[in-house]
Amino acid sequence: GVQTCALPISLLNTLMLAVGASLVCMVIGTVISYGEVRSRRTLPRLLAFLCVLPVAVPGIVYGVGLHWVYLKTPFYGTVLVLLLAYVAKFMPYSVMVSRSGVMQIHPELEQCARVCGAGPLRSLAQITGPLMGGSLVAIVFFVMLLSVKEISASLLLYTQRSETLSVLTWSNVE
């Protein structure tokens, strides 16, 4: 009855959250890391530091905090709240992996492209992007795996419409 009905919804929610969180984390984490590594300004470094802080917070505390914040909003009980929770929770891994990818690319490669007439976006798209391809793929797969197995924040934020496979498994074991 209920369990067979819940499986397709849980599977779809899990896949949407895994893909969505991984792509958002990859893009935002890479932009933050690029700004941190290539810029000498304080703001990008502070932003990168703030993005890495959720590693120090246990998942259950994180889930309770998000539950409290989103409880009275129209987003509560939707998959969007889980997506925001996953992105915020897994952003540190994206920032750390993309930071190492950016650091491996010498800035002179981008400077050479700029000297040859390429603009900043073109040098990023044609030089930095392809060289960071391995790091970007690693971020996507790593965040996807973390998203699929995420249970602590999901248990506190899910509703019947936003149930994931990990929550469904938890409820079946219980």
Image (cartoon, rainbow, N blue to C red):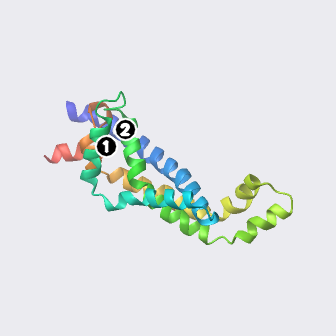
Residue found 77% across the figure and 66% down from its top: 111
Task: Say whether residue 142 is visible.
Answer: no
- The mark found on residue 52 in the picture is none
Left or right for 31, reference 94: right
Q: Are marks 2 and 1 in contact (CB under 8 Å)?
A: yes
**Residue 137 at x, y percent in the picture:** 54, 59
> Mark 2 highlights which residue?
81
Q: Secondary structure at mark 1?
A: helix
Mark 2–mark 1 Cα distance, whole angstroms, equals 8 Å
> Mark 1 highlights which residue?
66
Which is nearer the eye, 3 or 30?
Answer: 30
**Residue 170 at x, y percent in the picture:** 20, 47
Which is nearer the eye, 72 or 122?
Answer: 72
Q: Residues within 10 Å of mark 2 (few under 14, many from 20)?
A: many
Left or right for 25, reference 170: right
Q: Secondary structure at mark 2?
A: helix
Q: Is residue 46 above or below residue 6?
A: below
Task: Say whether residue 46 is visible.
Answer: yes
N-terminal-most mark, 2 or 1: 1
Quarter that holds the N terminus: top left
Residue found 54% across the figure and 51% down from its top: 28
Residue found 18% across the figure and 43% down from its top: 171
Question: Residue type at mark 1?
Answer: Leu
Q: Is residue 28 above or below residue 38?
A: above
Question: Residue type at mark 2?
Answer: Val
Which quadrant of the structure image shows residue 39? bottom right
